[in-house]
Amino acid sequence: MDDSLDLEFAVTYRHRIFFTEGAFAAGNRVLADLFAGAKVIPIVDAGLANSRPGFVAEVAAYGKAMGVAFTRPPLVLTGGEAAKKDSAVVKAALAAIEADKICRHSYVLAIGGGAFLDAVGFAASTAHRGVRLVRMPTTTLGQGDAGVGVKNGINTFGKKNFTGAFAVPAAVVNDLALLASLDARGLRDGLVEAVKVSLLKDPVFFANLEKDSGLLAAGNIPAIGRAVRRSAELHAKHIAGNGDPFELGSARPLDLGHWAAHKLESMTNHRLTHGEAVAVGLALDLICARELGLFGVLETERSLNLLVALGFKIYAPEMHLDGGAPMLAGLEEFREHLGGQLTLVLPTAIGKSTQVHEMAAAVVRKAADELRARDQQPCVARS
């Protein structure tokens, strides 16, 4: 006799994001109140530890002063894209979680860039099938996008984020003061995600980025803080409100420019940062959208001009490697990551978008050729 059960249940998640400045200053209670006497293992990005001498000691001193039950001095692990290239950081974090007896009522405090948070977050999401994670992004990219999301993972089989898990962090703490140690490239990197999300969701934000582009390009921290704050809000509200936070469908509603960006990161062996690759991919998608009659000429020029004004290059020579065939292969890899049919998001106006399910190779090649021509004539004004 055939039989079955078909049950449906819902789980409610709470996604908390705190914005502060000087989280480890004496008297700042954001972290102390979050942890409320629970055990905490602090894990710090080596890049941050090296760029801010004394930071590790500062974290330890905060724990002592505020009564936070750190299980050890901050554990320093490899940061940057190297954190995701293999399982070394994940294994080191898991070993520390096991050694310190971190349980589901304890916390992992991960402090670092987006790639570092991805790797440590993957470890936290798999230990005991998930222990509580507090993310502290230390880059503009992390604070405005990657760090406020619910995705974790590392790169395996030569594919970005092939191995990973979805897990809502117990909290995200964005500390503006942590951006002060970034160089110009690091400060700029996350601004491309602000441009992207403004193109998809908020024309007023886009106009503000245009207005503040000089300050942003110059590394003005208050202006960058405003941009990162709004970017984080738009990304987080989408995760919480779009009905598919764990990407069970085939849509990629926030991934404008990302199919090409993911491919370019690997093709350039990470010569391009994630933000720099997204800038190129964004420019490519914008021109494709214009060629398909979806996005206006004026809006396309405004968008490309904003990317350039912020200091991004919008062309990478790897786009034309082997006639563009490796680049075009990124479309299928992008589809394969979620499965189902290819789904790309493209703008229809600043603040509005649509989804398309195919992209002709001829359109991509034409857009890439145009970006190369623009790159060869950088002084030509366009309006």
Image (tube, rainbow, N blue to C red):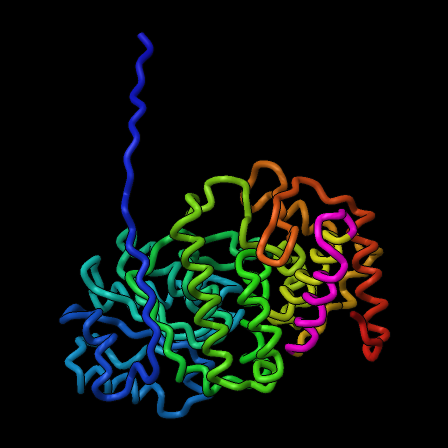
**243 with respect to 129 (left or right):** right
**Residue at horizontal 86%, vertical 67%?**
373
Which secondary structure dominates the residues rendered in magenta? helix
Residue 256 or 330: which is nearer the viewer?
256
Whether residue 344 is visible, yes or no, is yes
Residue 276 against residue 261 in the figure, above or below: below
Which residue of the protein is positioned furthest toward the bottom in this rendering?
53
Whether residue 274 is visible, yes or no, is no
- Give the magenta part as a residue range: 291-310
Q: Is residue 309 magenta?
A: yes
Q: Is residue 314 magenta?
A: no
Q: Residue 262 at x, y = what percent?
A: 62, 58
Query: Which image quadrant for residue 357?
Result: top right
**Residue at horizontal 59%, vertical 52%?**
352
Residue 185 or 20: which is nearer the viewer?
20
**102 with respect to 276 (left or right):** left
Residue 252 or 329: which is nearer the viewer?
252
Q: How many marks?
A: 0
Q: Residue 11 at x, y = what percent?
A: 28, 43
**240 with respect to 328 (left or right):** left
Q: Residue 253 at x, y = what percent?
A: 54, 49
Quarter of the rendering occupied by the N terminus: top left
Q: Residue 299 at x, y = what percent?
A: 70, 61
**Residue at horizontal 29%, vertical 74%?**
42
